[in-house]
Image: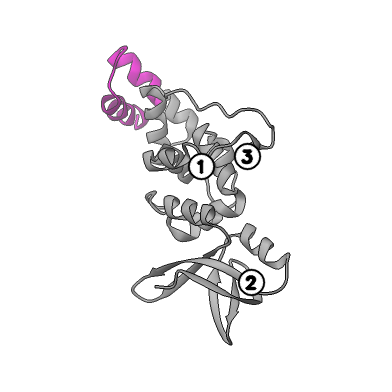
Amino acid sequence: MIAALKGFVESTQDGGCVLDVNGVGYLVACSRKTLDRLTAKDGVQKLLVETRVSQDAITLYGFLDASEREAFRALNEVKTVGPQKALLVLSGLAPDQLATAIAAKERKRLSEVKGLGAATANRIIDEPAMQKWAVGRATPEADGSGAAVTPAAPETPEADAVSALLNLGLKRPEAERAVSRAKAKLGEGAELNALITVALRESAR
């Protein structure tokens, strides 16, 4: 497997570049932010590489630093994200900004990444592995405000149930109404699985 490449940027294209390594051109997929940094300077450049082998292709993904590669690997652990959507996320948010958004559960901020969408943004934020990855990486400077990042308070079963319904394709107002009706039927202290089950029935009415 290829772990790193060092060479000249021969050309760039939407979603990647061709890196000339001793006369051999390697097509490497990159985030927009990495491409911008590559084209900002001349000479030999080094890319860390993640090699992915599928049934019909070998694809190289390139990163200028280890933090972006780690974020890419973490994002690929989220169901339905995959390498291409991971690059979309990293094109919109640097790793520290992504960590801040996840730690603070800024759903709107993540959903506004071009080409991502609310459902995928919610999956990323709700994925326990991503929350674990974000711990310690979120920085006060990441959101540009200079203010300390306050981790989000633990969400209630009702909020988690709404999130689950959003992941199933319901619109937020519809999901919130269904969960509210489910809570009214089940009473205080209802467990998450019960809330989701009853809310699904309510949403079908």
The segment highlighted magenta reads 178-205
Is residue 67 or residue 71 the one in the foreground?
67
Query: CB atoms at circles 3 and 2 under 8 Å apart?
Result: no
Under mark 2, the amino acid is Gln
How far is mark 3 from mark 2, CA to CA?
28 Å
Q: Main secondary structure of the magenta part?
A: helix
- Residue for point 39% across, 40% down: 127
Is residue 163 or residue 66 the one in the foreground?
66
Q: Is residue 127 above or below residue 60?
A: above
Q: Position of residue 60 (x, y in %)?
A: 48, 70
- Residue underneath mark 2: 13
- Residue for point 34% across, 17% down: 183
> 10 Å neighbourhood of mark 2: few (<14), some, or many (≥20)?
few
Under mark 1, the amino acid is Ala
Q: Position of residue 171 (x, y in %)?
A: 47, 35
Res. 111 visible in picture: no
Query: CB atoms at circles 2 and 1 under 8 Å apart?
Result: no
Specify the label residue 118 is tagged with.
Answer: 1
Task: Spot the residue most to the top.
Answer: 188
Query: CB atoms at circles 3 and 1 under 8 Å apart?
Result: no
Q: Secondary structure at mark 1?
A: helix
Q: Nearer the viewer, mark 3 or mark 2?
A: 3
- Residue underneath mark 3: 142
Under mark 3, the amino acid is Ala
